[in-house]
Image: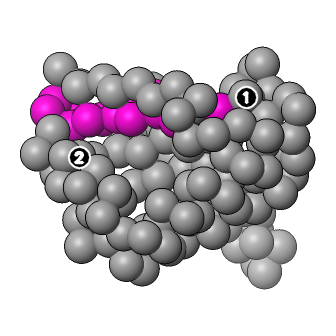
Amino acid sequence: MLKNLTLLTTLFLSFFAFSMGHLDHEKGLHPVAKSGQVIVTYQGDCSKGNTKKAMQLIDKIIAYEKKNSPIKYSSAPGTWSDNSIGAVDLHDSEDAMNKAFDWQSGDKKWSNMFDGIAKACGITTDDFVIKIMKAK
């Protein structure tokens, strides 16, 4: 009896797990952004610098933003296929993005941290390629 109950439970759990995976597969990934949200990418060439140090500094600036920015937004660090470094930010709207930019430019610590990232790569903040896309 116990053996049958164990087998039945295992079969039920296996079916449930398979079904959940199957449903997730059918749904696919969620959209990166909702209509009206804004995606900002920061990309800097770090081929002549210290990529590892730069990525550590990017992690620190993102932690600083999460704790100190009065405008909430999502940010993720990363590297591109050409080994450049940077981050991707997601803002709720164009207005929220502009407020975040204003906060960043007015926050001396944030500006110094961004300068430090560029310096670790042997470039300046002006060398970063910043692209903005509004989701439809």
Tell me where residue 49 sits by quadrant.
top right
Q: Quadrant of the N terminus?
A: bottom right
Residue 56 position within the rendered picture, expressed as x and y whole percent measured from the top left: 75, 61
Q: Is residue 66 magenta?
A: no
Residue 59 position within the rendered picture, expressed as x and y whole percent measured from the top left: 65, 62
Residue 58 position within the rendered picture, expressed as x and y whole percent measured from the top left: 64, 57
Determine crowd level at label 1: few under 14, some 14-19, many 20+ residues with C-alpha closer than 10 A: many
Q: Is residue 59 above or below residue 37?
A: below
Taking the image as drawn, is residue 3 in sight? yes
Tell me where residue 131 sits by quadrant.
top left
Residue at 14 percent across and 33 percent down: it is 36
Q: Which residue is mark 1?
A: 45
Q: Quadrant of the C terminus?
A: top left
Q: How is the image coloured?
A: one colour
Q: How many marks?
A: 2
SS for dot 1: loop
| Residue segment shown in magenta | 27-44
Q: Is residue 70 left or right of residue 48?
A: left
Q: Is residue 7 left or right of residue 126?
A: right
Specify the amino acid type for callout 1.
Answer: Asp
Q: Is residue 33 left or right of residue 125?
A: left
Mark 2 or 1, which is nearer the eye? 1
Q: Which residue is mark 2?
A: 97
In the foreground, 83 or 108:
108
Specify the amino acid type for callout 2.
Answer: Met
Q: Earlier in the sequence, mark 2 or mark 1?
A: 1
Residue at 42 percent across and 45 percent down: it is 89
Q: Is residue 70 above or below residue 52?
A: below
Taking the image as drawn, is residue 43 in sight? no
SS for dot 2: helix
Q: Is residue 105 above or below residue 50?
A: below
